[in-house]
Each structure stands twice: as structure tokens, then as C-alpha cells.
Image (cartoon, rainbow, N blue to C red):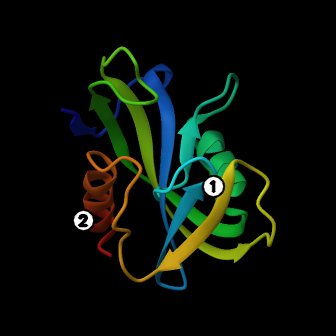
Amino acid sequence: MLEVKFYDNVADSKLKFAVIASKSNGRWVFCKHKERTTYEFPGGHRENGESILETAERELYEETGALEYGIRPVCVYSVTGKTRVNETGKETFGMLYYADIEKFDPDLHSEIEKIVLTDTLPGSWTYPEIQPILLDKVINVINL
């Protein structure tokens, strides 16, 4: 079982992931990875030398093709428990963002097969114990 927590702030060095809940023209933006049948928010690992905002912007472009957008931080989150990206199960930290995407590159340049813009939430989440909780936080903080 996974545990998700939220924080106002943690040391920058602890932030390993960026997740970006996104909308475009009022519709939710979800990604479908080429190797999975499920849907997820854009996001991923922080690379050496990147600020966490740079991670969010890079992942948003790589996974959705977002060219023009507004992005803002929502809060720090953590996940405790073993996942595909956390084999130890120790608490890992990330920054949760919200983006409003105005323009997309027509071509995706990553492991993402397609993006989906939808009014409804996907029935099949990649991380069903994490993503709905993050989405609820974004909706409450951003007042969507």
C-alpha cells in the first residue's frame, strides 16, 4: 500500500520528481506511454543540474509537446511504498505543478505514444494509488 503526503516545502535537494496536472481548452491532458495501456500525467525524474521547474518544463514538452503554456507550483508531495520507480519503498519527494497548455507541437519526441484531451478522467490510471490523490490536491488548490 502506498502513502501520499503533501508539504508546503522541503529541501530542494530532496525533490526527485515533477508531476504536471494539465489542462488545455478546459480539458484534462493525459499521456499514454508506448509500453503501457494506462494513462498518466506528464512528469518524470529530475536530471543532474536541473532545477525542479526545469524538470517540469522538460517533461511537459517531452510528453505532451506543450509549446505555449502557463505553469505554476501546487505543492511538494511524497510517496512512501514500493512502486515501479521506487524499488526501496522509502519516502520520495516531488513537486506537483499545474499547467494550462495553449499550443502543442504536433509531433511527440519521447516514449509517449499519444496524448488525450478529455473532459472525464481516465478509467485506467498508470499509478491508481497516487494520481487521483494528486489530482484532487490540484483541483482544491487551484480551484478548478
Q: Look at 33% across and 76% down and name the residue there.
A: 144
Q: Where 69 sits versus 110, above or below?
A: below
Per the image, the residue denoted by label 2 is 140
Task: Give the amino acid type for the residue marked by disc 1 in the picture.
Answer: Leu
Task: Please say if the residues under marks 2 and 1 sit with CB atoms less than 8 Å apart.
Answer: no
Element at badge 2?
A: helix
Q: Amino acid at mark 2?
A: Asn
Q: In x, y percent, where is residue 20?
A: 50, 54
* In the depicted structure, whether residue 6 falls above or below residue 47: below
Image depth: mark 2 or mark 1 in front:
1
Q: Distance of mark 2 from mark 1, alpha carbons? A: 22 Å
Question: Toward the viewer: 50 or 40?
Answer: 40
106 and 23: which is toward the camera: 106
Relative side of 140 to 43, left or right: left
**Relative image position of residue 44 (x, y in whole percent):** 56, 40
User: Label 1 crowding class (10 Å Cα cut-off): few <14, some 14-19, many 20+?
Assistant: many
| Rendered image quadrant of residue 63 | bottom right
Residue on which the image places disc 1: 60
Residue appearing at x 31%, y 19% in the figure: 89
Residue at disc 1, secondary structure: helix
Position in image of residue 11 (x %, y %): 41, 23
Position of 80 with respect to 126 (left or right) is: left
Image position of 122 (left or right of 104):
left
Quadrant where the N terminus sits is top left
